[in-house]
Image (cartoon, grey):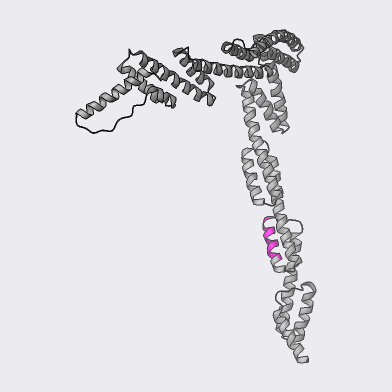
Amino acid sequence: MDCSHKGSSATHRILLLLTLWVAGCQVAEIEVVSVSDLIQSGQFEAAVRQASEEYALDPGDPVVQAWRLNASVAWLLDQGRTELLDDQDDTAMQFFQKAVALDSSNQVAVTWLWKVRRKIADRLVSEGEELEASDDLSGAIQRYGLALELVTDDGQALAGLERATLLTAWRIGVAEKYYGAGVRDMRAFQLFEARSNFDYSDKYRPGDERSARRREEVEHFLVQRRLAIAADLERQGLYAAASTEFRMTLLVDPENTIALQGRERTSREIEAQRILSEAEMLALRGNLAAAMERVGEGNAITRKQGDSFAKLARSIEEDGFRRVYQRAKALEQDLLFREAILVYNELLDVAEFFEDAISRRNTLQEFVQEADRTREQALREGTPSAAASALRRIEIVWPEYDRRDDLVRLSGDAADGDQ
């Protein structure tokens, strides 16, 4: 700690106490903390502020100047270390560079600047190696060069730069070979082979205008071929495949009107196909109402699959009729003839000639009518024997006759008389 600085602070404190005493004020002694203490305790902003205040009072004092410099460098180093811990290496280097610019003799600042330059250089070398591995040689060369600007004797950066430069020269020769092959394939109208060769040429020499121009010519011919293929697929109802061809065309020629219209058509039909599949699944699960609703939605979208939706609608309708028919048959088998007749009537109201529904209903109606007539005749006669006879005749065709109670009571009276 600088003694002259401490002496100056003590003098200020004594003068302040004497002034207050003379004025008759009783005050506590004010503790004045030095710039050095603030720096050592890590209060760098406070140290800079106090040093600036003291410098403003006495800018010519070399001690004040020195502590102002020390405080500024300490604050810059603290900011740089904080940024470095947060992996903000470039920002950290700026702080360390400013610190060294202020005091190039400060070995702490010089060391931190070297550390951050080393860290950034290592990162640039790693990025260069990754770019080199992914065949981006120009990017790799750029990264290795930046690393050498920071650390001029970096062995890895030097080796990487040399390796990437030699590989770039070799690839230029390979690119020429593929370009020549592409031109020959193009003349033979072997378009896919030509495009592949121009792609390889561009891979080994990115940005080559000749390869790009030739590839555009090939793509023009391929666009025409793709449009023809897409149209044929669309005619076959293979809308997803056709849509793919239209999309591939638009990747090359985004403004192609035929491809734009084709993509819009096929997208609509793909959506209709999706709805058709959903309707089929709903029908299989027995949710006929929801299935029919989906059929209506899909039919409103499609322009080319109306027959498929109509066919599914008929199938759903047929399935619905069959369910009603099966319900009527189940009631018939349970000998609930009157209920079965009602369900058959419900079916025949919407499907007049569904299988044998008419004959079954008519037969049941005859059974019911005959049973009712037999019952009424026995009741008119009013004799137990007539009731018993009527019950036997009815039970031959309708064991679960639903209006037999009065006949049972009447025939039971006959049994009681015999006893």
Name the dominant secondary structure of the magenta segment. helix
Q: Quadrant of the C terminus?
A: bottom right
Q: Nearer the viewer, residue 143 or 90?
A: 90
Could you tell me residue 166's position as x and y percent? 70, 8
Q: Residue furthest left?
A: 23
Q: Nearer the viewer, residue 64 or 236?
A: 64
Q: Which quadrant of the view contains residue 276?
A: top right
Q: Which quadrant of the view contains residue 19?
A: top left
Q: Nearer the viewer, residue 125 or 339?
A: 125
Residue 108 placement, left or right of 215:
left
- Residue 346 on the magenta segment: yes
In the depicted structure, whether residue 148 falls above or below residue 408: above
Q: Residue furthest right?
A: 396
Q: Residue at x 73, y 58 (%)?
A: 325
Q: How many circles with numbers are drawn on the protein? A: 0
Q: Residue at x 67, y 45 (%)?
A: 279
- Residue 343 on the magenta segment: yes
In the depicted structure, whether residue 394 falls above or below residue 265: below
Q: Quadrant of the N terminus?
A: top left
Say if residue 162 shows up in the picture.
yes
Q: Which quadrant of the view contains residue 362?
A: bottom right
Say if residue 206 shows up in the picture.
no
In the depicted structure, whether residue 321 falls above or below residue 120: below
Could you tell me residue 58's position as x and y percent? 31, 16
Q: Which residues are magenta?
A: 340-352
Could you tell me residue 164's position as x and y percent? 67, 11
Could you tell me residue 371's position as x and y percent? 74, 74
Q: Residue at x 60, y 19 (%)?
A: 123
Q: Residue at x 69, y 62 (%)?
A: 343
